[in-house]
Amino acid sequence: MTTKELYDQYMITSMVAGFEPIEVERAQGTTITGSDGKAYLDCFSGISVVNAGHNHPKVIAAAKAQMDKLVHCSTYIYYSPTAGLLAKRLAEIMPGKLQKTFFANSGAEAVEGAMRLAKQFTGKKELIALTQSFHGRTVGTLSVTGNYGRKKGSGPYMSGVGFAPAPHFYRCPFKTSTPDDCAAACAEAIEDVIRSQTSMDVAAFIAESVLGEGGIIVPPDNYFKYAKAICDKHGVLFICDEVQSGFGRTGKMFAIEHYGVEPDIMATAKGIADGFPLGAFTARADVGGAFKPGDHLSTFGGNPVSCAAALANIDVLIDEKLSENSAARGEQIMKRLHKTVESAPLIGDVRGKGLMIGVELVTDRKAKTPAVVETKEVRRLCREAGVLVGAGGTFANVIRLQPPLTLTAAEADRICDVVSDAVGKVAGKK
């Protein structure tokens, strides 16, 4: 049987809109190779996961060495040296006073735990999230997800959640004329949500530093400063979701560092271990001490092999200056794609930070009509040209560029050439 036939007969895949027709045999650095021998430049990194590149030798070596000693012991029953060392390392690189970490297996688990910790610490029970957001696929994380496409067919969801408008200047609900006006209006709406959608019993405000699944929505510069001031005024903790934007992805170790704001709790996963499954939430020491025996546990959380990989991954990110490379390559790509906009009316907006870039396609720039069919076609043409890109966003009309942070200048140029050519071909068919 072919791999596709195995998937069709034995795996639950009906919830997936469509697989890329590639059978992945191996990968190295920025390159994925199919079973047919064709090589592809990977511009999606397994959904923003392999930040240090596929199969980085130092990460693989660390995981193999740990496997020879110990694969599993249950980190929350016995002391695991590797988990302890990783928690210390995270405290060293986290912004502000974030210090104490709980390890899970995924981003959704990390967000779930962060929300539970916020409730435990504050004694409050309600939450505020953003429209167009995505925080995971459990009932709890979908409850704070502001995206119909991810939530449909799975309700009812958790009560006690209010939604404030996403700070998305390109599609600002307040029709503002400047990014800062959009930031201020969207932040002020949080206070209105507290007063109108809650019982004033709000434990936390949760937001992605850059909204990934929403379409690489980059909040304006002052948004989080405005939002944090409102949260502090009402005794509301700020949970920062860095699951997709963390570990060098945006040109800094964590995207929230672009905004000069310190979260009270931060959720991480994806890029934390360069492909090994691991999630975490890290809090201020006083907040982290709110859990009492029996309040929270994870059988596989803090797996020694994943923790060893994460320790090596962090060293690679720092030693090889991958955050800096992300910033440089991202600037290179954005500059070229902004020039493409002049001759490509199909492109409505180009936005991003570092190597977390979104190209929003529209059929009418003035009306900002989502170009859904065209987005699928651009993705197909890119794949056929040997470049794998993502496609998504709230309206399914955003090309997502999130390659490994080891991307070279020549590879960045290739991405721009292929994407620009694909957009031009699709626009020419209209």
Image (spheres, helix red, strand yellow):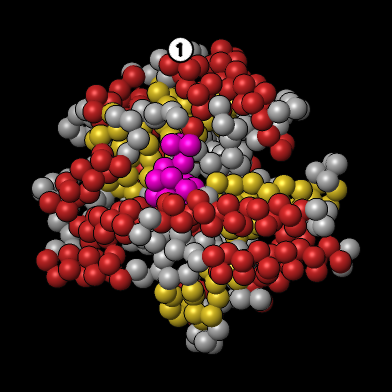
- The crowding category of the residue bearing disc 1, from other C-alpha atoms within 10 Å (few below 14, some 14 to 19, many at least 20), is few
| Extreme residue toward the right, this view | 430
Q: Quadrant of residue 308?
A: bottom left
Find out whether residue 244 is within the magenta segment: yes
Magenta part of the protein: which range? 243-258
The percent coordinates of residue 124 (x first, y second) are 38, 19
What residue appears at the point 38 percent right and 55 percent down from the top-left corner?
321
The percent coordinates of residue 379 (x first, y second) are 67, 65
What residue appears at the point 55 percent right and 42 percent down from the top-left corner?
211
Asked if residue 275 can be seen in this view, the reply is yes
> Which residue position holds label 1?
233
What residue appears at the point 56 percent right and 31 percent down from the top-left corner?
221
The percent coordinates of residue 203 (x first, y second) are 41, 22
Q: Judge by depth and name the residue closer to the eye, 55 or 146.
A: 55
Q: Main secondary structure of the magenta part?
A: loop
Q: Is residue 331 above or below residue 26?
A: above
Report how many numbered discs are placed on residues in the image: 1
Q: Judge by depth and name the residue closer to the eye, 142 or 383.
A: 383
Q: Judge by depth and name the residue closer to the eye, 220 or 302.
A: 220
What residue appears at the point 13 percent right and 46 percent down from the top-left corner?
77
Q: Judge by depth and name the residue closer to the eye, 312 or 324.
A: 324
* Kind of residue at disc 1: Lys
Q: Is residue 174 above or below residue 13?
A: above
The percent coordinates of residue 27 (x first, y second) are 43, 75
Find out whether residue 302 is within the magenta segment: no
Q: Is residue 390 above or below residue 194?
A: below
Compared across the picture, whether 155 is left or right of 256 comes to right
